[in-house]
Amino acid sequence: MDWKLELVSVPVSDVDRAKAFYTDKVGFVADHDHQVSEELRFVQLTPPGSACSIAIGSGMGQAEPGSVRGLQIVVSDADAARAELAGRGVEVSDVQEMPWGRFVFFSDPDGNTWALQQIVGRAD
């Protein structure tokens, strides 16, 4: 049996601002944006090439906006990923070298934190 993580909830304070950040600046694809009722809005966004999406919205019983730490996306080239994000106006760290990979860090407007990891020396 396969177990696939396909959706992670990311709590945000302003859905439109967060959606614009993730699509316009980070480059995620907007898969769904449904205003289910006056109280409930569901937005699903997916990083390019990823099988896992994030969900943002309102009325979803999420944690406090900005409380998610350490979401991680694997990239093939940390330098290129950093340049792409910086070119889109994202405040992004320098590439950091660690024994288990090369990392770039950024936060969304609410303070949810992300890491981009280039895995080095992986035996595929």
Image (tube, rainbow, N blue to C red):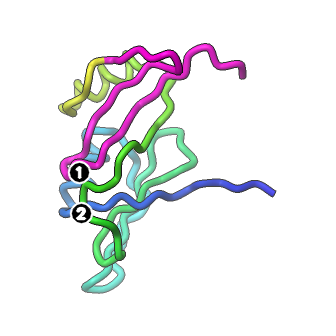
Q: What element carries label 2?
A: helix
Residue at x 36% of width, y 64% of height: 43
Q: The N terminus appears in which quarter of the rendering? A: bottom right
Which amino acid type is marked by label 2? Val
Name which quarter of the figure residue 14 lies in.
Answer: bottom left
Note whether 84 is above or below 18 in the view shown: above
Name which quarter of the figure residue 83 lies in.
Answer: top left
Note whether 110 is above or below 98 in the view shown: below
Which amino acid type is marked by label 1? Ala
Note whether 77 is above or below 49 in the view shown: above
Callout 1 environment at 10 Å: few (<14), some (14 to 19), or many (20+)? some
| Residue identified by numbered label 1 | 20
Residue range in magenta is 95-124
Residue at x 21% of width, y 60% of height: 16
| Residue identified by numbered label 2 | 15
42 or 92: nearer the viewer = 92
